[in-house]
């Protein structure tokens, strides 16, 4: 049974490993001609798809969907991590600013509590949004799942 895989995704995975088509053929046990045909038109057998997926530690279905490459995935997750650090630093700076205003006398105790509550709520909402984005990417299979069983 012939199936289609995303050729751009397959090529990017191969290139990220620094492999030629011949090297990919060797590690998968497929012929060079098979690799060339798959990269040209995307059609392959279930066995070829699974051999390719195994080499890249993906599920076979991941090759069909054309997920982001591992380097792009790592970059996206790193960006989310830095966003979280930015939120923490921003919250700390805002808290220090509110506390200084309170202790200098420019802010009453009532508004001090309100300001800290608002800062906490905004921070909580921002972290919830980042968590939602991360989960959405996983559900949409933009972040590939690692192979856990034989296909």
Image: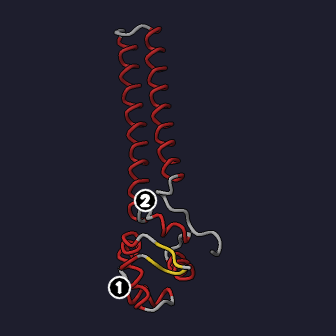
Q: Earlier in the sequence, mark 2 or mark 1?
A: 1
Q: Tell me the colour scheme of the image.
A: secondary structure
Residue at which label 2 appears: 73
Can you give x and y, in whole percent of width and height, for residue 78 in the image? 41, 53
Tell me the SS state at disc 2.
helix
Can you give x and y, in whole percent of width and height, for residue 75 in the image? 38, 57
In the image, is 19 to the left or to the right of 58? left
- In three-dimensional space, the C-alpha distance between marks 2 and 1, rounded to whole angstroms, equals 22 Å
Mark 2 vs 1: CB contact within 8 A:
no
Residue in the picture at 42% in, 59% down:
74
Can you give x and y, in whole percent of width and height, for residue 102 in the image? 40, 13
Residue at which label 1 appears: 20
In the rendered image of this protein, does residue 150 appear above or below residue 33? above
Displayed quadrant of residue 31: bottom left
In the image, is 144 to the left or to the right of 80? right
Q: How many marks?
A: 2
Residue in the picture at 50% in, 57% down:
141
Location of the C terminus by quadrant is bottom right
In the rendered image of this protein, does residue 44 appear above or below residue 77? below
Q: Residues within 10 Å of mark 2 (few under 14, many from 20)?
A: some
Tell me the SS state at disc 1.
loop
Displayed quadrant of residue 93: top left
Depth order, front residue of 30/149? 30
In the image, is 65 to the left or to the right of 82? right
């Amino acid at each position: 049974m012939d199936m289609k895989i995303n050729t751009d995704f397959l090529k990017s995975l191969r290139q990220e490993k620094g492999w030629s088509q011949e090297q990919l053929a060797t590690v998968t046990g497929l012929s060079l001609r098979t690799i060339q045909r798959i990269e040209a038109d995307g059609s392959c057998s279930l066995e070829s798809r699974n051999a390719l997926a195994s080499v890249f530690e993906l599920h076979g279905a991941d090759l069909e969907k054309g997920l982001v490459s591992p380097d792009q995935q790592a970059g996206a997750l790193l960006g989310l991590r830095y966003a979280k650090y930015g939120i923490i630093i921003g919250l700390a700076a805002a808290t220090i600013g509110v506390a200084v205003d309170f202790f200098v006398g420019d802010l009453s105790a009532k508004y001090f509590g309100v300001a800290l509550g608002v800062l906490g709520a905004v921070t909580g909402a921002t972290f919830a949004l980042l968590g939602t984005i991360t989960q959405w990417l996983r559900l949409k299979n933009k972040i590939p799942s690692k192979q856990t069983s034989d296909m």
